Image: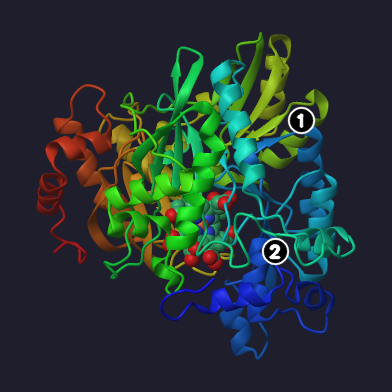
Amino acid sequence: MTFGGKPSGNEGIKEKSDYLRGTISAELDDLSTPQVSDATYELLKFHGSYFGYDRDTATERKKAGLEKEYEFMVRMKCPAGRLTAEQYLRLDELVGQYANNTLRITTRETFQFHVVLKQSMKPLIGEINKALLSTLGGCGDVNRNVITCPAPIKDNIHAVLEAGAYKLAAHLAPKTHAYHEIWCGEEKLNFGPDKVIEPIYGEHYMPRKFKIALGQPEDNCMDMMTNDLALIALFNGQELYGYNVALGGGLGMNHNNAATYPRLATPLAFVKPEDLVNAAESVVKLQRDHGDRNDRKHARLKYVVQEKGLEWTKKTLDGYFGREMENAKPMPKFAVVDHQGWNEQGDGKWFLGIPVSSGRIIDRGEECIKTGLREVIKEYKTPVILTADQNIILADIPAGEKRAITEKLKKHGIKLREDLSEVYRNFIACVALPTCGKALAEAERVKLPLVSEIEKLMVKHQVEKEKITIRMAGCPNGCPRPYVGDIGIVGRMPDHYVIYIGGDFEGTRLNKKVFDKVPLAEVPQALDSMLGIYAKNKNLSEGFGDFCERYGVEAVLSEAKKELTNYKWVN
Ligand code: SRM
Ligand code: SF4
């Protein structure tokens, strides 16, 4: 393949890697250094791992003349977030053996392992594969974990969504044998020169990460429109009649660089049920061939769609699809269903959605989520589902076991839906420090104290029963999807944040920046004034973001400024 302009360094690394082998295996075996080369750093992403270091200790160690504490993050792929009880229990053991003893549910329905040392990489990923799970394509320039509605409801709608997610994940998984050689100890196979190793991706894979969500308008619980490709299933009752195909969502941006921006996917086409895979493959191929391979900051599908225009995109997509696709069908207004608490599955059994703060499965103080989950899953053999808001669902529970399970979880200090405020339950914070190499400020580690401050404000303004989504990120990359929340709090520099308002609970609108460089300690003050304006002027059950949209973000901001005259960040 030839590219116009000068391809980014990553393109050369991929090209020379012999389909993602590079020197990964030899470098991991070399324990004379805790580090890996730049090329291996890039290639490891395709295998589901990031190399990094502990950012808490780096400065002190540098002063003391010591090298950084190098470590790896390992991210699984877990289509539709589904795991068996046995798989969960095995992962629960593996984090103790090879990582920092916490499993971390991500905003894409899978698990991350943190603080994995070099010598643990092969054993850990090998064991994950023995549990019939994988990390292949957890990160890297390929299709990432395919997400869908996590609710284990036993009806045709949810069966269609789950099966579709598995089908897409399998079809778009990298086909190189390198993964099995490096992590599962398999021999290199000689396929001969005519074998096409990567029929969809080719040796350069994608220009950048690529993300797919499959859902229905009636339950946008995973913010479908923030994906490169949102496949929106349309049903007549329980009967699937096709999918709207929406292209070009993505959230990553840089502060102070207007050429980078968040964007929601645009519905461009409609396909019949049998064309799901062909439609997805066509979008992948469009982005494969037209995404910018010279500038990785400009390489996502959203820039192709935005800059080439909708007409060009649709026409080009039709070319890959092999015929003209129908235009997108009208859709009902998006809604979000709450999957926390006890819910009937539709087959006489129940599922329990358990809130997990920032997705961190850990025993912390009185709240022993790790032990409590392990005991319940071991005893009741419940299948496990990971949600895109970093929570966990235990499924297939007979009515007669509900009480004992609730009691057991509470005995371990685990708070359930009824114990928590709306703010707590709908607050997502990304990993950030100390493991994330991109973090400009804290997120997960400062979340709980901030939540309690905001809970007090909600009570003060008597809006504590209103639904509100707050998303907190350590940097502008957008991992907790901050730009679609009612409120987004985004790391700007150490201890300082940008505040955005006016997204919506249903994930269909981008919010707008209102304050810049707000110190963490003053974030509650900024929110206090805006929540006060909301409480005074809102319509009955109007969400905060919807209120801002109706009243005007500018109007909310100018009224808030009148009350906030003493703060440096108000100008
Ligand atoms: Fe993310 C990079 C964590 C979901 C946009 N993301 C990272 C890295 C790997 C940092 C890095 O590049 O060095 C973070 C690892 C932190 C750590 O220490 O563990 C990281 N992203 C996460 C997770 C774990 C956040 C969480 O708290 O749950 C999520 C893992 C998802 C998964 O299982 O695959 C996660 N990241 C997202 C999402 C949300 C989504 O996919 O629904 C987004 C916004 C949507 C999008 O892709 O636009 C997102 N992450 C990014 C970006 C910006 C990409 C861009 O187009 O500019 C980066 C930076 C990059 O790729 O260069 C990034
Ligand atoms: Fe790291 Fe930024 Fe993503 Fe948070 S939003 S996990 S700080 S890359």
Relative to 538, does residue 439 appear above or below in the rendering?
below
Counting from the top left corner in percent of width and height, residue 553 is at 16, 46
Counting from the top left corner in percent of width and height, residue 189 is at 86, 62
Inter-mark Cα distance, 2 to 1: 25 Å
Type of amino acid under label 2: Val
Task: Check residue 31 in the rendering and tell me which mark sits there, or answer none.
Answer: none
The residue depicted at 39 percent of the width and 37 percent of the height is 325
Q: Are marks 2 and 1 in contact (CB under 8 Å)?
A: no
Disc on the earlier residue, 2 or 1: 2
Q: Is residue 262 left or right of residue 114?
A: left
Q: Is mark 1 on a helix, strand or loop?
A: helix
Q: Which of 258 and 273 is in front in this view?
A: 273
Q: Which residue lies furthest to the bottom in this view?
A: 65
The residue depicted at 75 percent of the width and 63 percent of the height is 194
Quadrant where the C terminus sits is bottom left
Q: Is residue 560 left or right of residue 133?
A: left
Q: Residues within 10 Å of mark 1 (few under 14, many from 20)?
A: many
Type of amino acid under label 1: Ile
Counting from the top left corner in percent of width and height, residue 177 is at 78, 59
Quadrant where the N terminus sits is bottom right
Task: Check residue 377 in the rendering and tell me which mark sits there, or answer none.
Answer: 1
The residue depicted at 59 percent of the width and 89 percent of the height is 63
Q: Which of 241 and 444 is in front in this view?
A: 241
> Does the rendering let one see residue 403?
yes
| Scheme of image coloration | rainbow
Q: Which of 220 and 53 is in front in this view?
A: 220
Counting from the top left corner in percent of width and height, residue 11 is at 55, 74
Residue receiving disc 2? 115
